[in-house]
Amino acid sequence: MPLAKIITGFKFTFRSLKYRNYRLFFTGQSVSLIGMWVQNVAMGWLVYRLTSSATLLGVVGFAETIPILFLTPFAGVLVDRWNRRHIFIATQLLFMIQAFIMSFLILTDMIQIWHIITLSVFLGMINAIDATTRQSFWMEMIEDKEDLGNAIALNSSMYNSARLVGPVFGGIVIAAVGEGICFLLNGISYIAIIIALLAMRLSPKVQEARKTNFMRELKEGIKYASGILPIRYTLLLLALISFIANPYLVLMPVVAKEVLGRGSQVLGWLVGCSGLGALIGAIFIASQKSNRNLDNFIFGGAFITGIGFIIFSISKLLLLSLISVFVISFGIMLIIAFCNILIQTVVDDDKRGRVMALHVLALMGMTPFGNLMLGSLSSRIGAPHTFFIVGIIVVLGALAYRQKFLLFH
């Protein structure tokens, strides 16, 4: 392939970086995400070092995610009412404060498990607002709607690249200087995204005065989303995937040890293949030329995800299991990203915050319960049978989604 064609393809895949505001966001967020993954690794290690309790690991994870379920719909109303950049900056400052408090408590040897749980709940509350704001902010950074899918895909590739780099770096820092420095580094990393947000040049937007009360606006957003069939069915499929398929990594230690008869090294390979599949999926999405036929991509992603789970459930071979995990993560990435793009292109801007709050709820709010369900089901019937059931349900969900869209067209 000629060098000129390779360069042209590279520029097209990364075309959203031509926008100054998105370029600033991409740079600042790249630093911040690595810091976040460093903190995530340190958090798990810290909890287990203090308590030696797998149960408390789950409690801390649940404490961090459960506020998303209850607060996200209300966050959507706030995002539609207030300046989104100002909210975004505020959430980054609060993330920074949380990290610095954790770092101080650890470095002064005052940290206790109740501190961790309380600050995890606080982190979850910030996340509920931040995730909704983030998903509503794309259209303010991207001038051409045709490049929206590319920007979302590049963000996913950035997230998954950080997922590969951050935990490794975090492990090195923990071994060298302890968990407190990990939280300190994460706090410092938020400076990059705050500077990027302050440096953006955004078109002034006229905020219409709200004449209705808060709860009425919330109900209006839910009614609007349920009344537009592409948004309704896309959110339902996303919720299904987030509940039953997205949490599958929680069972990887069981697969590595009991199904494949291997140790922690193979666990690392399985998780690594998951990250690689998601990263390749994000690059594939970024290379798409337009936002057309999004429902076909969503159906295809769900269908291959289900087939990947079925093959994974019967595999006893390491290579086949690694390929299956790659396919599963590739498919889930297609579902998540293309669902986001479809909803973003359909929704009216004055209701974007409330609809994207429902998107965040479907994507993130279901996962804690999915973790509990998969763990409980696996303990009863085993991981292979659990994955087989997941695969069948995902395939049926894909077919139902496809049928609904055929009827809609």
Image (spheres, helix red, strand yellow):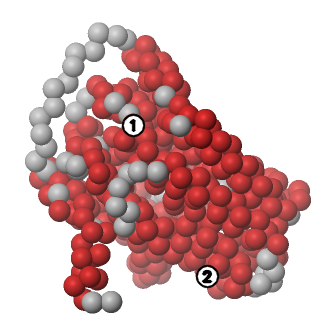
- Residue identifier under label 2: 269
Q: Secondary structure at mark 2?
A: helix
For the residues carrying marks 2 and 1, which lies nearer the camera in this image? Answer: 1
Identified at 24% across, 76% down, the residue is: 8
Residue 66, given in percent of the width and then of the height, sits at 57, 41
Residue 80, given in percent of the width and then of the height, sits at 31, 28
Q: Secondary structure at mark 1?
A: helix
Q: At label 1, which amino acid type do we have?
A: Val
In this picture, residue 251 sits left or right of residue 197: right
Q: Residue furthest right?
A: 381
Identified at 46% across, 51% down, the residue is: 293
Label placed on residue 206: none
Identified at 56% across, 77% down, the residue is: 272
- Rendered position, 145 above or below 349: below
Characterize the local packing of mark 2: few (<14), some (14-19) or many (20 or more) Cα atoms within 10 angstroms.
some
- Rendered position, 391 above or below 92: below
Q: At label 2, which amino acid type do we have?
A: Trp
- Residue identifier under label 1: 346
- Rendered position, 374 above or below 363: below
**Placement of the N terminus among the 4 image quadrants:** bottom left
Residue 114, given in percent of the width and then of the height, sits at 55, 48
Give whichever of 29, 320 is nearer the camera. 320
Give whichever of 27, 372 is nearer the camera. 27
